[in-house]
Image (cartoon, helix red, strand yellow):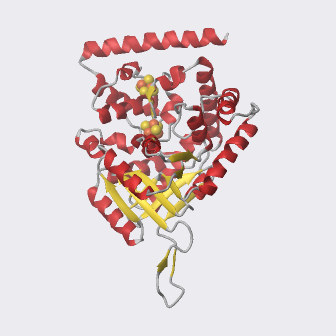
Amino acid sequence: MKHEEVRALRKAFKSVKERQDLNHLNDIYARSRRLMSSRELCVGNEILLEEAVMNLRKNGIKVHLANTKQEALDIILDEVAKEKLIVKSKSNVTKELELTKYLEKKGITVVETDIGDRILQVMDQKPSHPTGPVTHLSAKEIAKGISKYYGIQVKETPEEIVKIVKGDILSSLEKANVGITGANAVTSEEGSIILTHNEGNINEVMRKQKHIIVTSIDKLYPDIESAMNMLKILSFNATGSIIPSFVNVITGVTKTADVEKKFIRGIHNPSETILVLINNRRREFVEKGFKELLYCIGCGNCLLHCPMYNTIGNEYAIDSYLGGKGLAYHSIYSGESDGKLELCLGCGKCKENCPLKLDVPEMITKLRSKGTSSEIYFFLKSHILWVYYQALLRSNSE
Ligand code: SF4
Ligand code: SF4
């Protein structure tokens, strides 16, 4: 990552930390404890998962269970059918599936509708934060990148950039018949799907004729109340606000029974709501003793406080697997201990600032270690590199 990108990243992280201080979330510790209990109860709980699927189906939602990445991709392609344009919202699970690349290979155009994600898409860049993907790019750099893509001269102001990108997104939203979103939670008691966003784009994407929701089996919560508690903690840690602008709860399909009490579905859009629930090796995480990694709610607070991430940015990452937690996840998922794990300083700042107190440094040690001498070597290597990159960053800013 370039030095100016690291500086932009640090600036954005600082402003989130300041907002967290200003908007202190009441009872944050009690809330975090409640979140921890619901994650302990739900992750890997096949009985609760079955109950959720049963209730979702009762509510008229078509549920597909996909064990592997390829199964999930085939199901989604089948649901997309003959459509050639898809509008999509931010989703870590679709990134994990590399869904956009797959659909594009099949001749389908996929347009991201989140402003930051659309900017990344047109600039062919990697994300730097799970909820703020272009945090590392300045308005100047974005204007340069999107001017080239759209073939016009875009002014270097956030307002102008958003106006141009929004116009592009709106034209695709008008034409598309299928929308794909992720989900933040699936609840067992009600059979509900919960989505949250600040931009309002999900409101538009989910009103296409067909709404396909792609998420994973670890997003399970016992009920709506516990999912709402998670959303508050997620929002506070990711952006500093105590609740996102929009929370959508889907517990069924559009329907009426107004005429002779006969149920007719598909009154308004979406006429079909489809949920694709993927496993993609999550059950192996549980079996291998890394169940805790699945408790993660993707708030990104660990990144805000990680000294290595604040020094080399998304060089301390693989694609959208960001920072120590992302690298640990990727190593277990791919079955290979990645060399970037050696960059972890073992400082514990991520654990300290994680709402679930996930012990990422311990997991990294477990994954990379070949004994005490190798740990001494990794300690020295990571600290020397960190000091070196810090010095480079400082000399470059002088
Ligand atoms: S322990 Fe490793 S991943 Fe965690 S904050 Fe320190 S350097 Fe980052
Ligand atoms: S590891 Fe913790 S702090 Fe980091 S994204 Fe997950 S829940 Fe948030």
Looking at the rendering, in which quadrant would you find the C terminus? Answer: top right
Front position in the image: 135 or 221? 135
In the picture, residue 344 is in which quadrant? Answer: top left
Residue at coordinates 35% horizontally, 20% vertically from top-left?
339
Front position in the image: 180 or 354? 180
Left or right: where does residue 137 sit relative to residue 280?
A: right
Looking at the rendering, in which quadrant would you find the N terminus? Answer: top right
Residue at coordinates 61% horizontally, 49% vertically from top-left?
198
Residue 3 locus on image (x, y percent): 59, 17
Work out whether 333 lies above or below 247.
above
In the picture, residue 258 is in which quadrant? Answer: bottom right
Residue 77 locus on image (x, y percent): 40, 52
* Any part of residue 297 in sight: no
Q: Quadrant of ligand 1?
A: top left
Front position in the image: 217 or 375? 217
Residue 98 locus on image (x, y percent): 42, 40
Residue 108 locus on image (x, y percent): 49, 48
Left or right: where does residue 272 sit relative to residue 156?
A: left
